[in-house]
Amino acid sequence: MATIRDVSKLAGVSVATVSRVINKKGYVSKETEESIINAMEMLNYTPNDVARRLAGKKSNTIGLIIPDILNPFFPEVARAAEDTANKLGFNLILCNSDDDREKENQYYEMLINKQVDGIIIASYTATPTDLISLMNKNIPVIALDREYKGFDIPFIKTDDQLGGELATNHLVECGCKNIAHITGPLYIDSFKERLDGFENILKKNDLYNPQLIRVDELSLVGGYEATKKLLEDGKEIDGIFAGNDILAIGCYKALNDLGYNLYDDIKLIGYDGLEANVDYLEISSISQPTYDLGKYAVDLLVKEIREEKDISKEKIKLDLKIKKRKSTLGK
């Protein structure tokens, strides 16, 4: 996307002159104004956000882009972000991209036009170029639940590979020898990293069997179908690590429907620690500090907006905990 500097270069004037035209402040000759307007049209330049920033104004609004509002992990993050934003005097615009890159791009444009002061991006599809483009427009950005390795993009997340190791090691400690992994799409970094952790532990214990890994859609149905297929194929399994709690609940239902007893026949552990979803089923889980992820993301972003802290180098990984319940510990 074009910047105000691109406009000034094409029009042959200073950035300050372009700013005067955009803000309608100060004298600019008619000829120069027309040259600047023509340059903006040629470059398809939308000036609202940059103009406001040059004028030093704030909208006290931040955007939060999430990939799937139906995944209970993200509403919990959004609630924390909204609570924290309100306490700090900011409004929050929530955007659900449905894991759709085109829709996500439309949200970028909408948030720019609404003159948000910063954006928190939890995305499976956003590229480093997308985020850097926003940052080049002087829009503070922080990535949530994803690390863009090799790029100076601030992020806040947990260590998914460590989480995968914790989950798998717990099953090994519970005596499991044939451990399956049900995961979501591996283009999602967090699931790939959890798989890496799973593989690391099993290889160290000489228990790794790639035939016990199943990739399916990120849903209850995905967890159900992947588990059912493994068991109907006659795979010998005594433990399952599900890549998140939604998949784990699908696994739980498949085990019940096929007549397996949780814990006695097959031990099960999920990931995220969403108590509202797994507590009543007594499913063990790797617990992410979901509320803290949303809270700290807003805290950091607001510090950048208020010029209290440079967050460009912030790379934060919060601690994980393991919640051991009946599905792995028994009664």
Image: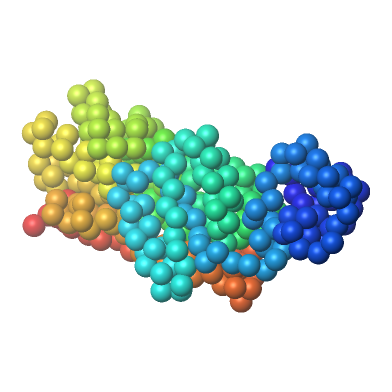
Q: Residue at x 78, y 45 (%)?
A: 37
Q: Which quarter of the image is occupied by the N terminus?
A: top right
Vertical relation: 240 (above or below) 116: above
Vertical relation: 56 (above or below) 1: below
Vertical relation: 292 (above or below) 77: below
**282 sits left or right of 171 in the view:** left
Frontmost residue, 73 versus 175:
73
Frontmost residue, 260 versus 147:
147
- Examine the rendering and report whether any part of residue 222 can be seen: yes
Query: Residue 304, how many percent across, how many down?
Result: 60, 69
Frontmost residue, 204 versus 156:
156
State which quadrant residue 222 falls in: top left
Vertical relation: 35 (above or below) 59: above
Query: Residue 189, how many percent across, how many down?
Result: 49, 44
Q: Which quarter of the image is occupied by the C terminus?
A: bottom left
**233 sits left or right of 123 in the view:** left
- Examine the rendering and report whether any part of residue 141 can be seen: no
Q: Residue at x 21, y 29 (%)?
A: 228
Query: Residue 33, how many percent across, how many down?
Result: 83, 50
